[in-house]
Image (cartoon, helix red, strand yellow):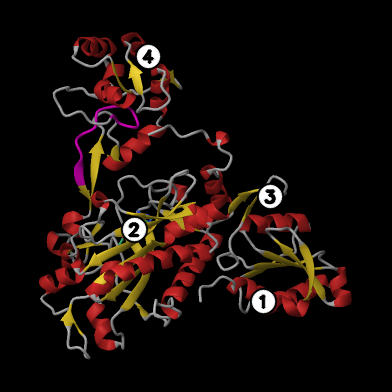
Amino acid sequence: MTMNAPESENASVKSMEQIVSLAKRRGFVFPASEIYGGINGFWDFGPLGVQLKNNLRDAWWHDMVVAPPIGPDGTPLSIVGLDSAIIQNPKVWVSSGHVGGFNDPMQTCRQCKKLFRADHILDMLSKADWVASFCETLGIDSIDATATLSGEDLSRWAKNRKGGKKLASGMALVRKTEETVSWLTAADTPDTMTGLDLARLLSTENRGEEIQNPCPNCAGDLTPPRDFNLMFESFAGAVKDDANKVYLRPETAQGIFLNYKNVVDTSRVKMPFGIAQVGKAFRNEVTPRNFIFRSREFEQMEMEWFCPPAEAPQWFDFWKETRRNWWISLGVDPENLILRDHDLDELSHYAKEGSGTADVEYRYPFTHPHYGELEGIAHRTDFDLKAHQASANVNLSYLNHETRDRYIPHVIEPASGLTRGVLALLCEAFTPDESRPSKVFMKFSPRMAPIKAAIFPLVNKEGMPEVAQKLYMKLRQKHAVQFDVKQNIGKRYARMDEAGTPYCFTIDGETLQDQTVTVRDRDTLSQDRINIDQVESFLAEKITANTPD
Ligand code: GAP
């Protein structure tokens, strides 16, 4: 683990702070309940944000359900849609393994009482204030580098303060400096050890216990990891007892398995086929963080692809490639996307050893130069259908009418985050440009852009507003477009740059003479003239460009 370089040292990394600030300022994303101080892990989407989110959702639905991808044999795949309830019979979550297995290991700090996900602690430590000053004292540049120990240095560091407060106030060394340093001197510890091992030792009050990582917040002692179930609970009915306990779904996928038989019985689908669903999911994440990357309420776009077990490995490969390419078709730079196969110890409770899970990962500014999950593609085998078949006592096998074969299909699941996809699109689009009045523009692909075009009269007189209004009335029938007459034209362009509007059509003096308008291209800043009658087809062509066949 190495310390992150400050952003000024790596100009190619976009600033998350600036992205969040633009998202707020221009109405993409607001903190939920902001006027009450917010609520951790919940976000609201503003006028531009909801439009962007809907565009991403609609593109997914179109490319999955309305016009599914072309399969390896050259014919279109068969995928149908579904919208199932968020709250289902609680037995569903017992059978699916979520009641028993959907847990995160959690640790609490005995000093500051903060809760942490055990698997996030190392990453948080690498960014903690107290760790930076600790490393500086030890003369090392990362917490896992080896340091030579000096009781003197440590006791000097323990007295450090920041803003009047003791740094690492929970650490045993800071609370009982003399005692801890003399213990360290007397104890049978090596003369050199890594900064992290030393910090672990120095934070531990009771040295008889197994040594844990120190608290990223105050360097205090953490309790051993305990499982924490991520499902939100509620009650259905008037009585709040265990019999009425229900769960908010932690994934949209189970609604699909529950309706698998309904779909087979009522539609004409034949194996292999898919069922797709978009909707809210809820997880009581221990540490929601990184803006909308990990929140407690979010949306998923999931498709369960049912296939004969023997075909599952080929379909797994097919979906991995298809899904990565889909994100590229939305304007995400291929350099910022990787496909990563999960290690065995990362597999979810439903993905059996050897069955495989891969992630499409995006290079977010906060993971840079590494990548973080955007979408998971899992071979869920027959785990879910078998589990529901056994618990609900229904036959969920599939009968191939031609061969008379009966089997429980395997499932390949491309499971994508809609909310997280919006974050990737925001990060990807954010383009600083000092030469523009706005200093930044949002480079959304025309298909994703919340506003497809703006229509401006150059000045609010001389017949220009009337012509612009007429064009606006025509375009708005088909596209999200804006008409704006306020402020000078430069300010109007700047506003549209921050909103990520790819084209601005301006009606000027020449329009009245020769029926042409200027098209300002957001990315190149070129201004070309086209006939006013061609505007509609020009825009339609740009919006549908790059849509997968
Ligand atoms: N049905 C499988 C499933 O739910 P997952 O990897 O846990 O798999 C799928 O979730 C996708 O949902 C993730 O790749 C991510 O994009 C999104 N997601 C998961 N947890 C999230 C959270 N707390 N906040 C935002 N998005 C989340």
Amino acid tagged 4 = Lys
Instruction: Write down the residue under mark 3.
Output: 438
Q: First in sequence: mark 1 or mark 4?
A: 4
**How far across and down, in percent of the image, does residue 207 sit?**
17, 22
Assess disc 3: are there few (<14), some (14-19) or many (≥20) residues with their C-alpha within 10 Å of its C-alpha: some
Rounded to the nearest angstrom, the CA distance separating label 3 from label 4 is 46 Å
Rounded to the nearest angstrom, the CA distance separating label 2 from label 4 is 47 Å
Magenta residues (range): 214-227
Q: First in sequence: mark 1 or mark 3?
A: 3
Instruction: Write down the residue under mark 4.
Output: 159
The prevailing secondary structure element of the residues shown in magenta is loop
Residue 388's quadrant in the figure? bottom left
Assess disc 4: are there few (<14), some (14-19) or many (≥20) residues with their C-alpha within 10 Å of its C-alpha: some
Which residue is rendered at x = 46% and y = 22% of the image?
A: 163
- Which residue is at the front of the view, 224 or 490? 224
Name the element at disc 2: strand
Rounded to the nearest angstrom, the CA distance separating label 1 from label 3 is 26 Å
- Can I make out residue 86 in this image? no
